[in-house]
Amino acid sequence: MKRIYGRIFLAMALPFLPCASNAQTLVSERSISANAGLEMATVALEACRKHGSVVTITVLDRADRVVVSIRDDGASPHSVEHSLRKAHTALTYDMSSAEFGKNAAKNPGNAGPLHLANITTAAGGLPIHAGNSLVGAIGVSGTPGSKGGGTEDAACAQAGIDRIAKGLTGN
């Protein structure tokens, strides 16, 4: 009997559902380009080198795909994964990885997101916006704590974003 009611309900609801011919079939999202990613990563690398840090920089596009990843000579192997996690956290939560970390510390009962793949609470990941649109993220990892750690990583990432800022307006 339940099946009959389910079918009747579905038959009654169908006329009110949007028809496929009216539904949007394709979407278009703005995303960071390879050229912009390479420029950001290069500038971030140079900014970190100025204070003597060897780091890895990862830039992600809007769809969470790696646009560029640069590991400086002598950067620790774990900095590759950590820069990716910082960028992923910034992209998926649309906030800096440091801000995500502060929020997580304030709400220890809500630790679920900390168990997701590629999430970190360490500073150094920043979202990239074009106007109100999230278009990518950058993560920097490798600055030792004695030189500022994640705070300096974030400053290097910001230097990269600042370099391409003019291109993020308009269009």
Image (cartoon, rainbow, N blue to C red):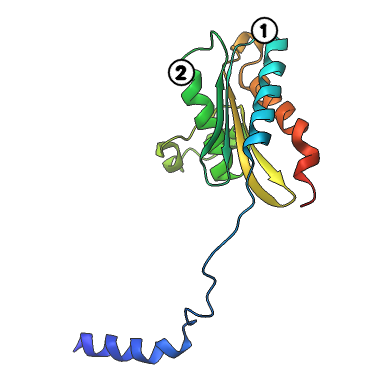
Residue highlighted by disc 2: 78
Say what secondary structure mark 2 lies in. helix
Split into 4 quadrants, where in the image is the N terminus? Answer: bottom left
Residue 29 appears in which quarter of the rendering?
bottom right
Asked whether residue 103 appears in the rendered view, the answer is no
Say what secondary structure mark 1 lies in. loop
| Label 2: few (<14), some (14–19) or many (≥20) C-alpha neighbours in 10 Å | few
Q: Are marks 1 and 2 in contact (CB under 8 Å)?
A: no
Q: Residue at x 72, y 47 (%)?
A: 130
Q: Residue at x 64, y 33 (%)?
A: 37
Up/down of 155 relative to 75, above or below: below
Residue 70 appears in which quarter of the rendering?
top right
For badge 2, the amino acid type reads His
- Give how far across and how far down residue 39 sits, in percent: 69, 29
- Give how far across and how far down residue 108 sits, in percent: 48, 37
State left or right for residue 16 relative to residue 12.
right
Residue 73 appears in which quarter of the rendering?
top right
C-alpha span from label 1 to label 2 = 18 Å
Residue highlighted by disc 1: 52
For badge 1, the amino acid type reads Gly
- Give how far across and how far down residue 116 sits, in percent: 41, 39
